[in-house]
Image (tube, rainbow, N blue to C red):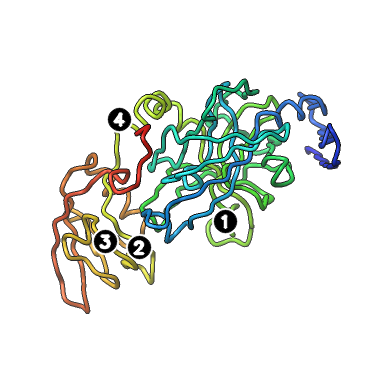
Amino acid sequence: MVNIFLKLLFFQSKVFLLTTFVIQVAIAEVTQDKIAEYYDAVVSISSKVPSDARSALSLGTQREGNGVVIDNNLILTIGYIVTEASEIEIGLADGRSLPGILVGYDHTSGFGIIRPLFKTDLVSLKLGDSDKIQLDEPLFVMPSKRRGVGSVAKMVSRRPFSGWWEYYLDKPIFTLPANEDWGGTPLLNTDGEILGVGSLFVPDAASEGSFSPGNMFVPINLLKPILDDLIQYGRRQSDIKPYLGITSEDFAGSVVVRRVREGGPAFNAGLRPKDVITAVNGVPVSTLQKFYKVIHGSGSAGIKINLSVKRQNQPLEFTLKSIDRLDLLTKPKSF
């Protein structure tokens, strides 16, 4: 049995933070100095997004979160904090604030990469292996000390997640207990290696439908194959998932369209809110998970997708030419 005790003390002084993790595990003890080193690599992020940006309606024009330095000039975060941003401010652990720029964004995983506008020497952390997390392993959820309080958590499940914004992950990391400042927050192991980046608060971390408030993290292994693309091109160059421009949800054993994005493939094809999607390319679908898996298994962005729909109980057929989600977003000059 692993006993974990966490005590965080914050002071308004040069040190600013005194953190003590006392971890009784057979294999390791994480010292206060180590925790201080980890915190030096975690930053706060503030961004401003134009009011006419595609994501402004759903995500707002003022966004806040966290990030973690993965080398001395690049910062990993969750993409919704910085996508379409016209201004980015990076808050360092030593109290300094720096202007930042969006380097790359990946809709499929949800990762975003930013960097300071001016070259700055920053403490960085290594990427770990998110496929090797053990259920009894203590994990650190570490938001910027300028924004929130760190906590110790454990992974409680790895299962598919389907989001209404055409977002699907096969094996995200679900942790307990919840940390209230999860957005862009790194999930670390006791060696200070990054295992994931915080994406969501969820009410059922332990299992679907259970009462177990926790957090969902995007596994770091999803970043490794696309990191060079994000740095060089601002976006992934392969395995680009087809995007239709539909907000939908599971409802009574059906996939129901709740919103159709103006100018997107579904809008141009004639889909409407309240349409019920019954099949994709002839394959019956009754859940978001099946809906996304069939679409993603059909090919890359640009392929045609056939949707069977019921509208007021009348069957209809639509053919959509899918796109890359990023082609609908406001992009900085680096793209």
Q: Which mark is residue 237?
A: 4
**Whole-percent x and y of residue 317?**
13, 64
Residue in view at x 18 percent, y 63 percent: 308
Helix, strand or loop at label 2? It is strand
Q: Which one is in front, 219 or 144? A: 144
Q: CA distance from mark 2 to mark 3?
A: 15 Å
Identified by mark 2, the residue type is Ser
Q: Secondary structure at mark 4?
A: loop
Q: Give the residue type that dot 1 points to.
A: Val
Task: Pinpoint residue 253: horizontal percent, then vertical percent.
Answer: 36, 68
Q: State which tag comes first along the sequence, 4 or 2.
A: 4
Q: CA distance from mark 1 to mark 2?
A: 18 Å
According to the picture, the residue beneath numbered tag 1 turns out to be 202
Check the image and report above or below for 44 versus 211.
above
Q: Disc 4 residue type? A: Gln
- Distance (Cα) linking label 4 and label 1: 31 Å
* Pointer 3 residue: 262
Q: Nearer the viewer, mark 1 or mark 3?
A: 3
Tell me if mark 2 has few (under 14), some (14-19) or many (20+) residues whose alpha carbon lies within 10 angstroms of its own. Answer: many
On residue 14, the disc is none
User: Do we see residue 254 in this rendering?
Assistant: no
In this rendering, is residue 202 above or below 72?
A: below
Give the Cα separation between the discs numbered 4 and 3.
25 Å
x and y, in percent, of residue 136 in the image: 69, 37
Residue holding disc 2: 248
Viewer-side residue, 313 vs 193? 193
Is 274 left or right of 214, judged from the image as shown? Answer: left
Q: Is residue 288 visible?
A: yes
Discs 4/3, front: 3
- Marks 4/2 in contact by CB < 8 Å: the verdict is no
